[in-house]
Amino acid sequence: LGVKERRRSSFGKVTLGDDLGISSDASCASTLTKYGANEITFSAHCIKINKRDECVKRILVVTNIGVVLLDAHTRRMRRKFAWRDLSEVRVSVFADDFFALVAPVEYDTLLACSRKVEAIVAMRDMWKRDARARGVIGGEDELPVRAGESFTYNATALRVRRVDFRRLA
């Protein structure tokens, strides 16, 4: 979007998409097909910051039905965001790994992923495909991505948290 810093090493990186091979893993594929996912465009390890500010290892998967978070150890589904439920993605403007998935009807999720830009590009592509399939016309066919030095997110249904990013000299 032109407002976010890039790492110097990111210009020569090759994008892989399903980096973890979730589509070829039998247990993950059966779990995802049970919920209707038949196409996986992106997968990567990430860290979810929970409501107690603890870091929990997850696997971020972008599918045709939405964004899915799997447990990194058991590979079971922990959270699912359908495309119609996801309203925007909030990111910091600095070259870091943090972003938040915002769902107005539920609580939001703060994640840290080393392949953040790839994940957001995959989400925008699948959001656009889903919007076309639903027949959405106009500006609603783009997943909004807001970049800023700080943002708020709903850590629980009743608790709003603010995240401030600062550059260390």
Image (tube, rainbow, N blue to C red):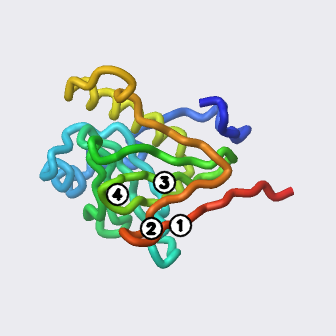
Mark 2 and 1 residues: CB-CB less than 8 Å, in contact? yes
Secondary structure type for disc 2: loop
Tag 3: amino acid: Ala
* Residue ID for mark 1: 161
Mark 1 and 3 residues: CB-CB less than 8 Å, in contact? no
Question: Which-is-in-front pick, marks 1 and 3?
Answer: 1
In space, the residues marked 3 and 4 are separated at their CA atoms by: 13 Å
- Residue at 27 percent across and 42 percent down: it is 84
Marks 3 and 2, the one that precedes in the sequence:
3
* Residue 134, placed above or below residue 30: above
Question: Which-is-in-front pick, marks 2 and 4?
Answer: 2
Report x, y in % for residue 85: 29, 47
- Residue at 59 percent across and 43 percent down: it is 147
In space, the residues marked 1 and 4 are separated at their CA atoms by: 21 Å
Most extreme residue toward the right is 169
* Residue ID for mark 4: 69
Tag 1: amino acid: Arg
Tag 2: amino acid: Ala
* Residue 154, placed above or below residue 139: below
Secondary structure type for disc 3: strand
